[in-house]
Image (cartoon, helix red, strand yellow):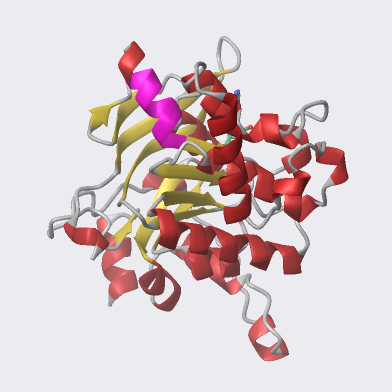
Amino acid sequence: MAETKEPLLMVRGLKQYFRVSKTFTVKAVDDISFDIFPGETYGLVGESGSGKSTTGQAIIRLYEPTAGRIVFNGEDISGNLSKQQSAMLRTNMQMVFQDPMASLNPYKKIIDTIAMGLDARFPHMETKERNERVYTIMEKVGLSKSQANRYPTQFSGGQRQRVGLARALIMNPKLIIADEAISALDVSIQAQVVNLMKDVQQETGTAYLFIAHDLSMVRYISDHIGVMHLGHLVETGCTEEIFENPVHPYTKSLLSAIPRMNPHVERGRRPMEYDPKAFHIRYTEGTAHSLTETHRVLATDTEFAEWTQ
Ligand SMILES: Nc1ncnc2c1ncn2[C@@H]1O[C@H](COP(=O)(O)OP(=O)(O)OP(=O)(O)O)[C@@H](O)[C@H]1O
């Protein structure tokens, strides 16, 4: 079981603030902690602006974290990175973005886009081997070798996202951060890409940080889920626990907003009002050997007692 292993990624007290003016600081991510285990998927959900993307970007070190610790693959990567740590990160952690068209260079052939990581990391690799590796990975994501010399505009949205996944997979990463990777796709294509991601995970053992707002897809792919609201991780636990027994009012409100076919259920949607400043992390440390094993909720002691009665 995943929980008996050491976490692949440990995030502790991560804060990512942006100073936008002399007097105003955006607390995009405010003191969040969670673990991702090797080969598992951690779904990060929450409304727009809740800090999901910033969390992913801080983890892959597009930013210098304001505070907190990020331990990845046994290395503390929260401070200044050594050359060796940067190389480790560029190989073992990859990102797949929301808009495949915007993240692919339209003037670059697919073969060269997919090989970008290889070219940077192994500049002296023989062309034959490099191309063979690209063809293998293309096949893995359901693209054919004959498409390698085409340009992004010659692909559909779903195919472009397969290219994005191939570009990440070619480095054989331990963690892929998929930031709204399926949101721009048609619903039927979303399912195909998510199934592909699951298959790839089975085969390669890569872990995912799956950032999304579509809760049904998140439920389908994730082992654990974290719910973000206004920069806070208000609740985290295993997927079934969160869906079957949500504790935090925000999670309840988010789940109640999933569209249902039944009109009576539709009427039961609940708005959510609470003052996030009044909350603190009730369960910061799990009593068992892993943090994510404990269903953690951001709440005051009294509120927590009330919800769990
Ligand atoms: N570089 C930045 N400078 C200033 N503010 C930022 C920056 N990046 C993000 N923010 C702010 O941080 C907050 C969180 O943004 P973030 O993009 O992480 O949210 P999100 O949950 O991913 O939302 P979405 O789903 O819309 O992308 C927002 O208020 C955003 O405006």
Camera-nearest residue between 237 and 268: 237
> Residue 272's x, y, as percent?
55, 62
Q: Residue drawn at (23%, 53%), measured in percent from left and top?
A: 291
Q: Which residues are magenta?
A: 85-93
Query: Position of 181 compared to 3: left or right?
Result: right
Q: In this image, 282 relative to 201: left or right?
A: left
The residue most toward the top is: 22
Choose top left, top right, bottom left or bottom right for residue 175.
top left
Whether residue 106 is situated above or below residue 283 in the rendered picture: above
In the picture, the quarter occupied by the N terminus is bottom left
Picture residue at 41% right of the left edge, 48% below the top:
233
- In the drawing, does residue 46 fall left or right of residue 288? right
Q: Position of residue 289 (x, y in %)?
A: 13, 56
Task: Give percent across and percent down for residue 259.
Answer: 68, 75
The answer to whether residue 104 is magenta is no
* Ligand 1 positioned in quadrant: top right
Q: Is residue 183 left or right of residue 120?
A: right
Q: Is residue 299 above or below residue 167?
A: below
The C terminus - image quarter: bottom left
Residue drawn at point x = 19 percent, y = 48 percent: 6
Residue shown at 71%/86% (left/top)? 261
The answer to which of 173 and 21 lies nearer the viewer is 173
Seen in the picture, residue 197 relative to 99 is either above or below; the reply is below
- Residue 87 located within the stretch drawn in magenta: yes
Picture coordinates of residue 179 (x, y %)? 58, 44
Q: Is residue 279 visible?
A: yes
